[in-house]
Every structure is written in structure tokens, then in C-alpha cells.
Amino acid sequence: MSSPASAENLVVGQPISEQLDGGAAGEAIDAFQGAIGHRFANARLLTAALTHRSWCAEYGGESNERLEFLGDAVLGLAVTDTVFRSRPDHDEGDLAKIRSAVVSEDALAAAARSMGLGGVLRLGRGEAASGGSDKSSILCDAMEAVVGAVFLDAGHACSIEVVHKLLAEPIRAASLRPGDNDFKTRLQEMAARSSGEVPRYLLTSEGPEHDTRFEAVVKVGGMTFGPGCGTSKKRAEQAAARMACAALDDKNNSTIETTGDKS
């Protein structure tokens, strides 16, 4: 019986393109390419997109970080193009909110899970043992790397098609209520209504330049919320703002319930 289809079956140093002819690993990669709707002409690009830095630390080679950098820009443009063309009834502000929600870590990680990205990632032993194949930050970064790889493999038009297929549902959901997942904007609006105070974010970071992790706390209304964590300053601040919004919503709901009990 063949072993489970996962990246653990891939041969160290051998490109995926040389492993597609058979076996569980080849079947997993075939299924993944079917899920994203693109079969790579240059399968070495796919190999690179699926290679996490923890794998490189143990076995050598180049990680997916350069492709992630490219994919972040490609993804933002592809989502912008899609929502601009498909949502003529939304103004610039709403379009920006939709894009922000769709390219968020949570949305990209959810899309990555739906297409089985975690199962084909190449992770180091330690990262794999700690559940790295389901960590939102790793999945989000790999998702961006895959989009970057599609762009290099087949061009801009194909990358837009892939992004639209993978993120059609998040785009639809975000279009119904623009801004619901933009927690920094929500927090700013809540603070303006309650005290007129502008939320202040305090950032810290740790780790080497190629593997920096950010933490953010936000201060508003005499209270501090967080820390929120992320692979970028923006994601860390969004995470902290999300915590603040949830706490303030709970506080407001509690106040309403208490007032109601006294009436």
C-alpha cells in the first residue's frame, strides 16, 4: 500500500517535475494543480513555491520567499482587477475594503486549506511536527508564492484566472459587507464614535530579516489590546485591532444588557 499523499514523499533535491509520473507524491501534486486550475509548464517553479525555509535549513536550496514577495504584488493586482470589473456598483472606498479582506492572512489561509496546499508543502522535520502544514501564516505565505509561480509560468492573465477561481467566494462574501474584515478601520470608527481618540499601534519584531515576526498592541480609550502577531506589520496590526474590536463589542453588549436589566 502506498504511503499517504504528502510532501513527505518527495525526494530531497529532486524537482517535483521529475516525480509526477507516479506514486502518492505525484498524485498529490497532480490533485493540487487540478485544484488551482493550472498545470505548470515549468514544474520547478511549483517546487520552489512549495518549499518552506524550514526545509531549506535542513536540506539546502532556495525557499519560496522570493516567489512570496512577487506573489503578494500579483495577488493584490489580480484581486483589484477582479473586484473592479465585477463590482461596478462599489465606490473606491468599498473596493479597497473588499481587497483588504480578500488578501488577509485568514482569507488566504482558508483558500489554501480548501485546495490542500498544506498537504504538499515541503517543511523541515521540526516545522512539520509542530503542525506547520496548517499554520495560517505558512499557508498564507505559500499561497502568495504559488500565485507568483503561476505568474512566472503563464503570465498575468492566467494568474488572474487562478486568483479568481480560488478567491471567488471570499470576494463574494466581502462584497456583501465591505469592511467587515478590515478591523483597523472598524476600530478607528468605533473609537471615533466613543471618544474621538485615534488608536495607537506599538510594534515589536524578532527574528532574522528573512524570517521576521511582528507583534502589535493597540491602545485606545485608555485600554491596551493584543498582542496580535503576523508575518508583516500590517497583519500584526490587523490582528491586534481584531482583538480590540471583539473586546469592545463584548463590552458594549454587556452594557446594553445591564441597562436593559435595570429598566
Image: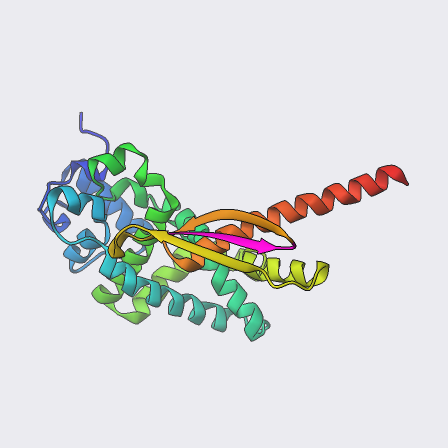
Q: Is residue 28 left or right of residue 74?
A: left
Height in image: 167 above or below 58? below
Quadrant of the rendered structure where residue 58 is?
top left
Q: Quadrant of the N terminus?
A: top left
| Residue 219 point in image, percent of width and height | 57, 54
Q: Position of residue 173 (x, y in %)?
A: 54, 56
- How many marks can you see? 0
Task: Give the colour scheme of this rendering.
Answer: rainbow
**Based on the displayed image, in which of its 4 quarters is residue 199 positioned?**
bottom right
Q: Residue at x 21, y 44 (%)?
A: 54
Q: Quadrant of residue 68?
A: bottom left
Res. 104 visible in picture:
no
Residue at x 74% of width, y 41% of height: 254
Magenta-highlighted residues: 214-221
Check the image and name the residue furthest to the right.
263
Please tell me which residue is depicted at 46% across the width and 53% down the height of the picture: 216
Of the pair 136 and 49, the residue shown nearer to us: 136
Which quadrant, please, contains the C terminus?
A: top right
